[in-house]
Image (cartoon, rainbow, N blue to C red):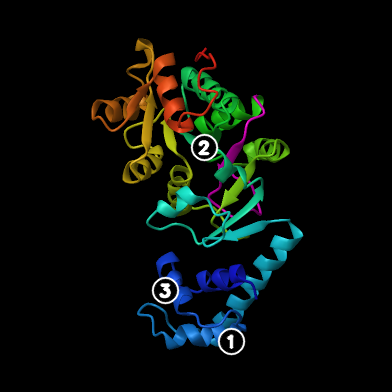
Amino acid sequence: MSKYQIIQKILLLPQIGNKTALKIINNLNINNYSDKELYEFILDLQLPRFKKLDSERYLKWQENCDNIFNNNELNNIKNIIYSDDRYPKELKELKNFPLILNYKGNIESLNSMAGVSVIGTREPTQYGEKIGFRIGEILAERNIGVISGLAVGCDFFGHSGAISKKGFTCAVLAHGLQEIYPKQNLALAEKILEEDGLLITEYPYGTSPTKNTFVDRDRIQAGLANSTIVIETGIKGGTMHAVNTTLELQRNLYCVTHPDKYKKEEKIQGNIQLIKEGKAKPLGNKEELEELVNLVKQGRSNLNEPFSLF
């Protein structure tokens, strides 16, 4: 049994989250276990929230594990664990970092190039669509990865802008790799893989999207990125989950500023508030974007290439 399989089996037990799983892993004293040995070892730890499974639930646990491992192989889904050298270093700074990442595509670029999270509302203005796409283009032109969540709206345009310039883009999913959600972005997901990009998730094969998985997904988007750019968000938009993670990690947060005719749009009031409160830097002209690129690239040689927002 591989280390990945041991960790996945632990995580599939009821009432076992990442922190409890780490406690179990740190107490393991051999490298290989049968299902029975692993299960009995966990029982012996007498964890406060973990209760003994009846025979039906025990068999269901085994079946779930086998189903995931078989489908990983059938669908070319790869996995890395938190102790792997290829595990994205930035993600380890999360308080509750995922112990397993399941993926398809090019994971090496997460460590080999800087990345920026490009996020925002699912219902952007025309300006938001245009600026989201253009920012994706510019980051790709500067060899900066675009990280987003494959949602409709701002995510779609950020990913698409990067792809249009043959850049690297990573889509963080809120479900297992048995599907693409939303379905209308299936073609985009396929294009990401065709262009040597990445689909990645902490969830095993068969996990469906829920409200909670989207919140968890947002922390990973921010955790993988050097900086976060908010294209458009309302004050209480779901984008704020990734914003809060960015602030907790003390990483660079930028919010796109808008022309006056958009100032009363509800979906940009979050941008306005974050800038006003000093939590985010404004992003609306060449100089401000230049500052972001310099921070992200950290003095690399191509910083003096000319560019403009439009």
Question: How far apart are the alpha carbons under marks 2 and 3?
Answer: 32 Å
Quarter placement of the N terminus = bottom right
Q: Which mark is residue 23?
A: 3
Instruction: Give yes or no for residue 175 being in the magenta stretch.
Output: yes
Residue beneath the point at 40% across and 58% down: 96
Q: Which residue is mark 2?
A: 114
**Which amino acid type is shown beneath numbered disc 1?**
Lys
Residue beneath the point at 48% across and 45% down: 224
Task: Decide: few, some or many residues near mark 2? Use Cα within 10 Å; few <14, some 14-19, many ≥20.
Answer: many
63 w.r.t. 233: above or below: below
The image position of residue 111, as x and y in percent, is 55, 45
**Which amino acid type is shown beneath numbered disc 2?**
Ala
Is residue 310 rendered to the left or right of residue 95?
Answer: right
Magenta-highlighted residues: 165-181
Q: Which residue is mark 1?
A: 36
Marks 2 and 3: CB-CB under 8 Å? no
Is residue 14 rendered to the left or right of residue 161?
Answer: left
User: What main secondary structure does the magenta stretch of the protein show?
Assistant: loop
Task: Determine whether the residue tagged by mark 1 lies in a helix, strand or loop.
Answer: helix
| Disc with the residue nearer the chain's start (3 vs 1) | 3
267 w.r.t. 240: above or below: above
Question: How far apart are the alpha carbons under marks 2 and 1?
Answer: 43 Å
**Which amino acid type is shown beneath numbered disc 3?**
Lys
Of labels 2 and 3, the one closer to you: 2
